[in-house]
Amino acid sequence: MGNREEESNCRMGSSHKILRYLKLREYISQRYREKHGFNVPVENILITSGSQQGVDLLGKTFLNEGDGIVIEEPVIWGLFKHSQSINQPLILFP
């Protein structure tokens, strides 16, 4: 585990930030296995610093420029402004 994960995280430029959450990611993996019977590898668990960072990562991963995002109102103003800045319009519904 150690070297491969450390090398991967160093390429991302944030090894110290990501590696300190290894114990938390291990705990989450174990809890999913024990409580729900899901085998979720530690490498598949990502800890973000907030909801906007998580939404940003999801958007960069799954959306193409210009794709719309359908979301229930009310919406966080920061998310609304962020979606405009990356050319992914929000489609709001009550």
Image (cartoon, grey):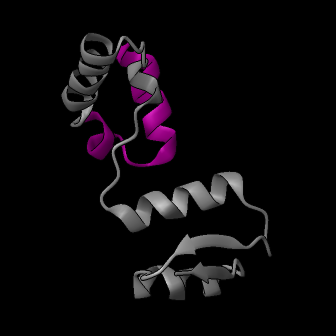
Where residue 7 appears, x then y in whole percent? 46, 28
Q: For this view, does 17 lie left or right of residue 63?
A: left
Who is closer to the viewer here, 18 or 79?
79
Examine the structure image and report whether residue 9 is included in the region drawn in magenta.
Answer: yes
Which residue shows up at 40% across the image and 81% down it? 76
Who is closer to the viewer here, 28 or 5?
28
Provide the residue span drawn in magenta. Answer: 1-19
Above or below — where is 13 with respect to 63? above
Where residue 8 appears, x then y in whole percent? 49, 31
Where residue 42 appears, x then y in whole percent? 38, 22
Q: Quadrant of the N terminus?
A: top left
Who is closer to the viewer here, 10 or 71?
71
Which residue shows up at 26% across the image and 28% down it? 22
Above or below — where is 93 with respect to 71? below
The rendered magenta stretch, by its main secondary structure, is classed as helix
Where residue 54 appears, x then y in whole percent? 44, 57
Which residue shows up at 28% across the image and 29% down it? 25
Who is closer to the viewer here, 23 or 6?
23
